[in-house]
Amino acid sequence: MYDPCSLSSLGASIKRILHTFNTKKVLLIHGYQSFKDYESVVTDAIAPDILLFRASGFSLYPELEDILNVANTARLEGIDTVIAIGGGTIIDIAKSVSVLWQQEAATMLSLLDTDIDFLEPQRLKLLTIPTTCGTGAEVTPFAVIYDGAAKHSFYGNSLIPQQFIHCPPLAVSLSNEQIAVGAFDTLSQAIESIWSKGSVTASREYAGEAVRLVMDNVDEAVRTRSPKAMTCLMKASFLSGRAIAITKTTGPHALSYPLTRKFSIPHGLAVMITLPYFFLFHDKILNLEDESYPVLRQHLEYILGLLNVKSGRHAFEVLCGLAARINVDISLSAYISAGDLAVLQQCNFNEDRLRNHPVTINRSDIQQIFTSSFDRLSAIA
């Protein structure tokens, strides 16, 4: 059952959870600008006998240095509970700190891209309160971290927060672009989950509902921020998180990380830049090999049904049309130069996500997808 709370009941929900946690010392991890709008609601909910410490001022994406600094605070102050209120970066930092708070830099580095569930007995209690409608990080068993230019993850069920609160009014102050980019991430996570190698019935049910909620509500959310539309987008994010917690993501996410890290393209936009072209890529493969990939065919038929289209080409048009309707340019040429395109094609891409894609993606395929997304006319010719 999905049970979001109102802004007026947020404080009571926080109090109840902290009481259940038997919290004595809490570390509040938050963003900066948007947090001002509801800071008093959160801090007033923390009882006077609970010692409050804060951490903020982070980079745009989760950095190893940020995690080390916050973990050091948790150790020195004897923190027993972490509250994270913000977007995916804030929540990923909090998730990492809640499990790795006793570890020094060398140990953290050695644990990158590994299962850290062996540390579960020492983890801190964690309450997450997302303020965006995109990542579903509050229900996923992994946390993204960047060490220099390289994207890594910690993973394990111990990273799933013990409690989370969904309060859709917290997302109302987001800009049109932030709402759109979050919805793009949700949509891509859900679609990728359906066609991933790890797709199962439960994940497809979560992902299918997420796709429907985004397609039915993103226009209204961007245009009016109605309570219904914002609640639906936050629920969609939650469901897509549930889906990828089972399956992980695939090609569009693998290709997105260099776009974000090298060219500062927001993550949700970075995945949406290539997502439509994966439908054309799949169409080409399936047309060449009529009897191959029966599972992929079945999963694509399900996705096409969710988008109310009959072909990958039509899905491409619908996704590009969605971005155009909400005034977001998803042409790669809007964000990088032709020279940058050559550099991009030499980047390393997340091998784990590429291996999870339902068909093999080689360097030539990646080059074609990026070239097509740079020059859309070449893709539809």
Image (cartoon, helix red, strand yellow):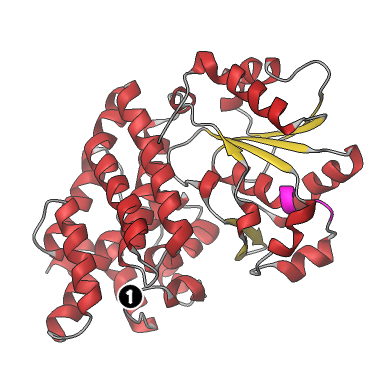
Q: Check the picture and name the quadrant holding the C terminus.
A: bottom left
Classify mark 1: helix, strand or loop: loop
Position in image of residue 354 (x %, y %) = 43, 74
> Identity of the amino acid at label 1?
Pro
Residue identified by numbered label 1: 358
Residue range corresponding to the magenta coloring:
97-102
The kind of secondary structure the magenta stretch mainly shows is helix
Residue sticking out furthest to the right: 76
Residue 222 vertical position relative to residue 287 in the rendered view, above or below: above
Position in image of residue 316 (x %, y %) = 19, 59
| Residue 39 on the magenta segment | no
- Viewer can see residue 349: no
Q: In the picture provided, is 212 more to the left or to the right than 99?
A: left
Q: Which residue is at 34% across, 83% downward?
A: 364
Q: In which image quadrant can residue 78 be found?
A: top right
Q: Which residue is at 20% across, 78% downward?
A: 294
